[in-house]
Image: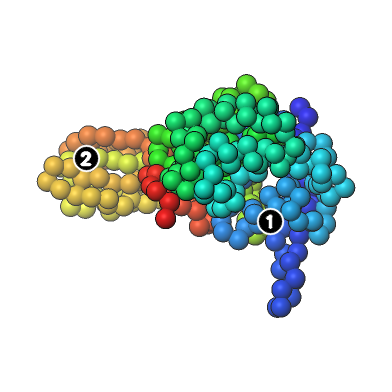
Amino acid sequence: MPTAVSTHSLSHNFDTPRGAVTALRGVALAIERGSFFGLFGPNGAGKSTLIRILSTLIIPTGGTASVAGYDVVREADKVRASIGLVSANENSFYGRLSGRQNLEFFAALQNIVPAIARRRAAELLEMFGLAYAADSHFQSYSTGMRQRLNVARALLHDPPVLFLDEPTKGMDIATAEKVRALLRREFVERQGKTVWLTTHDLDEMETMCDRVAILEHGSIRASGSPAELIRQASATVEYRLELSNMPPDFLSTMRALPGVQSAELVSHSDAATVLDLTFADASPSAELWQTLACDGVVVKRYAPKDEGLRMLMKNGGGDFTAHQPRNESPHR
């Protein structure tokens, strides 16, 4: 499968008053065309630096990178014509222009023929659920509406590659789901575009991306499909146990069982007790069930805790947190 984005031994240093700071260290990636790729890592990992290099905003210190088959240094103009870039905190729209006028203005900057620009703007406004507000001033848009217009603008010139930095930031949950579905089904699966996603929403990363890479201290720590990364991280597995009639020394008994790494009390009431049990593998020992039966404990619920990519973050020691989309609210 041809690659849409590739890097080889990519590195970048910044000069500071205290000396050189290394932001990227030998990054090597190959992103297939028509795929949905996710990059994440803690703050300061080098994610922004990597995207800035790939979008030709800065020149790498070492190594090479190409986007849509063009070298980001030697063929920067062709790269820029081939990408759409969405920044999380975009503020270049004009408040007194309508959403439609803003899109047509930016289309003109890209030398798109006016008739085509008008048609393209109308199509994108409809796709992203903004047709009803197309002729309203941008300054009246909520944060989520502004972000949707931001994504629409990146698609004006129909680029084959999209770089999206937290594209659903500020959207309410329902709108964020619709935008994710649109990006996946319309632009990746139907149109064959390549989408590069940077987000702190681990659920978004897990459900949207074909492949994921974890960047830490400027280096790629792991890469693969979300399922592959979760398997790599799952040296242990956690179960949540809800029961009643728990004996006083039950926690100590659980901790002494073979294969049990930890047993922690989550909550306790007259109605039920909830425990989290961590096992060394995915198969709790038979002694667990024998102990429960002998002690007269009534098990109400027993199920694995499905943490998905959060498990990888926990085991890897990163400072990731699951991001919940905020409700859309008027911009202030």
Residue identifier under label 2: 243
Quarter holding the C terminus is bottom left
Give the SS element for disc 2.
strand
Seen from the viewer's position, the closer of residues 157 and 216 is 157
Residue 185: quadrant of the picture: top right
Within-10-Å neighbours for mark 1: few <14, some 14–19, many 20+: many
Residue 284 on image: x %, y %: 39, 38
Q: Amino acid at mark 2?
A: Leu
How packed mark 2 is, by other alpha carbons closer than 10 Å (few <14, some 14-19, many 20 or more), is: some
Left or right: where 227 falls relative to 144: right
Marks 2 and 1, the one that precedes in the sequence: 1
Please, what is the three-letter code of the amino acid marked with disc 1? Thr
**Nearest the camera: 328 or 197?**
328
- Residue 186, percent across and down? 58, 24
Image quarter hosting the N terminus: top right
Q: Is residue 298 visible?
A: yes
Q: Position of residue 268 (x, y in %)?
A: 19, 49
Q: Identify the residue at the far top of this view.
A: 190
Q: Residue furthest right?
A: 74
Residue 120 in the image, given as x and y percentages of width and height: 63, 28
Q: Which mark is residue 49?
A: 1
> Farthest residue toward the left?
270
Please say if 184 is above or below 9. Answer: above
